[in-house]
Amino acid sequence: MNGKPARVSWGRRAAQWAALAAIVIGAAMAGWNGYWYTVGWMAVKRDAPAPSSPPAASLPAERSAQKDAPLGVYLGELAIPKLGAAIPVYEGVREQELRRGVGHYPASDWPGGRGHVVLSGHRDTVFRRFGELEIGDALIIRTDRAAIHYRIVNIRIVDDDDRTVLVEKARPTLTVTTCYPFRLIGRAPKRCIVTARPVRVDALAFPRG
């Protein structure tokens, strides 16, 4: 009988240590996620309306010199006038890029060509207001060479394994993707796909970030 209380005491102590470990791990994960949430939130800056310029005759035929940029390099920014925001764009869609801003799919074209441009961002950081966008809203990609103005023509929801968003297009197209539902906690089973068409190209000198 002398050993029985000891076993009960050890069991309680083990449970206490397990509970403490769970609290510490949970706090660490919350702190880590909070840190990257803050990094993404800070990446979105307020965007002042750009001065109007005469519309370019058409998109240039050649692909941008940035097409073969190394992963992680800064390419420009995605401006969303309706949200008053401008978000940095980096080459690649690894977590390293998506934590800092919007990622550009390396296999897709880059504005300046006549192909399909595909960008992606996290719904809980840089695209946390993505659900406010509607058909007809403007998107602008600014590089050190030009500002390409787009108009949203379609918004749809697809499964997370849908790869049709990456296929080639017959005309210049911008596709921006993010996870969906927007406010779901945890892994999102869907993707929100925004499709836009170019309407104007302005030449400009844009400082690289």
Image (spheres, rainbow, N blue to C red):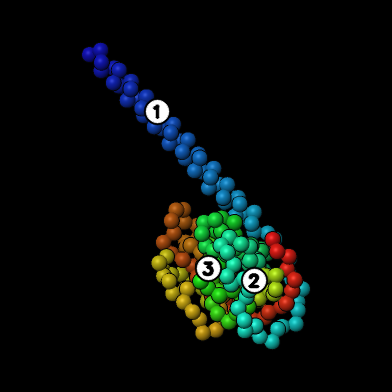
**Residue 57 appears in the figure:** yes
Label 3 sits on residue? 105
Image mark for residue 141: 2
Marks 1 and 2, Cα distance to the nearest angstrom? 54 Å
Extreme-top residue of the structure: 2
Dividing the picture into quadrants, the one containing residue 141 is bottom right
* Residue 65 relative to residue 16: left or right: right
Q: Which residue is at a point 59% across and 56% down the rendered structure image?
A: 100
Dividing the picture into quadrants, the one containing residue 68 is bottom right
* Residue 167 relative to residue 140: left or right: left
Where does the image place residue 16, in percent across and percent down from the top left? Answer: 39, 28
Give the amino acid type for the residue marked by disc 3 in the picture.
Answer: Tyr
Q: Secondary structure at mark 2?
A: strand
* Callout 2 crowding tier (Cα within 10 Å): few <14, some 14–19, many ≥20: many
Q: Point out the frontmost of discs 3 and 1.
A: 3
Give the amino acid type for the residue marked by disc 1 in the picture.
Answer: Gln
- Rendered-image quadrant of the C terminus: bottom right
* Callout 3 crowding tier (Cα within 10 Å): few <14, some 14–19, many ≥20: some
**Residue 132 appears in the figure:** no
Where does the image place residue 98, in percent across and percent down from the top left? Answer: 55, 58
* Residue 6 relative to residue 67: left or right: left
Q: Which residue is at a point 47% across and 35% down the rendered structure image?
A: 24
Image mark for residue 16: 1
